[in-house]
Image (cartoon, rainbow, N blue to C red):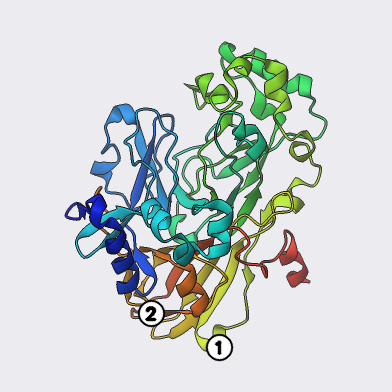
Amino acid sequence: MTTATAIPEASKKPKIRAAIETGEGILRLAPAWVPRSFMIPGRRIKLHPDDIYALGAHRGGICERWFSSTTEAGNENRAIDEGLSYVVNDGERFTLLEAVASEGPALIGKKMWDKYKRWPVYSKYFDNAGPIAHHMHQSKEQAAKVGREGKPEGYYFPAQLNSIGNAFPHTYFGLEPGVTKADVRRCLENWNKGDNGIIDLAKAYRLKPGTGWHVPDRILHAPGSFVTYEPQWGSDVFAYYQSMVEGRRIEWELLSKDFPADKAHDLDFLVDQLDWEANVDTHFRDHHYLEPINVAESWTEGYQDKWVVYGDFHGEQLFTSKELTVDPGVKITIKDGGAYGLITVQGVGRVGKLRLQSPSMIRFGEMTEDEAFVSYDAATRGVTYENTGSEPLVVLRYFGPDSCPDAPTIGAFKNLKK
């Protein structure tokens, strides 16, 4: 990417079309790294150790890599393009955001373009050394009050990146049944007295490689120290309800920043923003835990496609994700219902005309061959994957809203075990 040059506005549209044609509907993407000033990087997403603080220590360490993103990171003092994915073709580059704005119906499908006028989702690797604060993401209605969008999420823990669980491989979800709004309000009252104790009101679940979680908006969660692949809605809003993590103070602004300014210190309002019924659900695990489900039984053909993130959010399918594993020497064609972002987590091979290779180490600003965006036209027509290596080729791909009507429902994996 460091050698790719930006394209002048006057010639951008034809260059975008040329890149789509050259890749037969598949675009090569450069890594998009995102720092967080309030987190400690877990150092497992293949970024070189010397580059963890490539944007400066004042910006924080890089603990996230965003995939097929047209969403800007909500960081203070950020670069203007932070969080955005770049397409690289023939020594030139432009953002995926620009590509979708120029060729939306072809890239994401006419139905999605007509409804959203953008690629409305993204995914990322999240890699923290320890736990992070108990927080929630606003609903679309809440976020709209401050000119933003809500952010439901899905989690999947790739085995290839989780041979080490780091400091706390557990995640707190929701609140214990019986916890009251007064209990949570008291935690907010105690914000400046040290640890406000909200984790005492929650339950931790041990994390397991190869599984995941379905995390709607307004549900409290304190993610543990696994590397997480996170398909989610295209937003970066959040509200921290925990005042201290591992002895580190959390600023009140990280609770209030995505709520209306006149409500920033209204404790009753802040407590009421939580989805209370969902947070104190006595069967929380049953309603949110995910295990992979085979798309079809195809191991005899040398490959296996699995659903890894699935389930509706308030009756809407907003995003889904699949994990494709292809055996050495196998070449297959996969058809999907919509456009998708792709990241290679193991092996070498090809997707269409593009080479795929999962790197062992990446320098900041360095171009890789592990990421791509597959257009609606290519995905629905059928994309050919080939494993040219000696180990399995493993690819994660995530889809936008209503692209996968055949996706399973929450809890469907339990029926397959019977």
Q: Position of residue 12 (x, y in %)?
A: 28, 56
Please tell me whether mark 2 sits on a helix, a strand or a loop: strand
Position of the C terminus by quadrant = bottom right
**Residue at the image position 45 percent from the left and 41 percent from the top:** 128
Check the image and report above or below for 49 versus 407: above
Q: Is residue 230 visible?
A: no
**Residue at the image position 77 percent from the left and 68 percent from the top:** 415
**Residue at the image position 46 percent from the left and 60 percent from the top:** 104
Please tell me whether mark 1 sits on a helix, a strand or a loop: helix
Of the residues shown, which amino acid type is indicated by label 2? Asn
Name which of mark 1 and mark 2 comes first in the sequence: 1
Of the residues shown, which amino acid type is indicated by label 1? Thr
- Which disc is residue 300 wearing? 1
Check the image and report above or below for 42 versus 312: above
Q: Position of residue 195 (x, y in %)?
A: 58, 19
Counting the numbered discs, the total is: 2
- Which disc is residue 138 wearing? none
- Which disc is residue 387 wearing? 2
Q: Is residue 296 visible?
A: yes
> In the rendered view, does 6 fall on the left or right side of 30?
left
Between 363 and 384, the one lying in front of the other is 384
- Hey, which residue is sitting farthest bottom in the picture? 300
Position of the N terminus by quadrant = bottom left
Between 132 and 32, the one lying in front of the other is 32
Residue 39 falls in image quadrant = top left
**Residue at the image position 54 percent from the left and 45 percent from the top:** 169
Decide: few, some or many residues near mark 2? Use Cα within 10 Å; few <14, some 14-19, many ≥20.
Answer: many
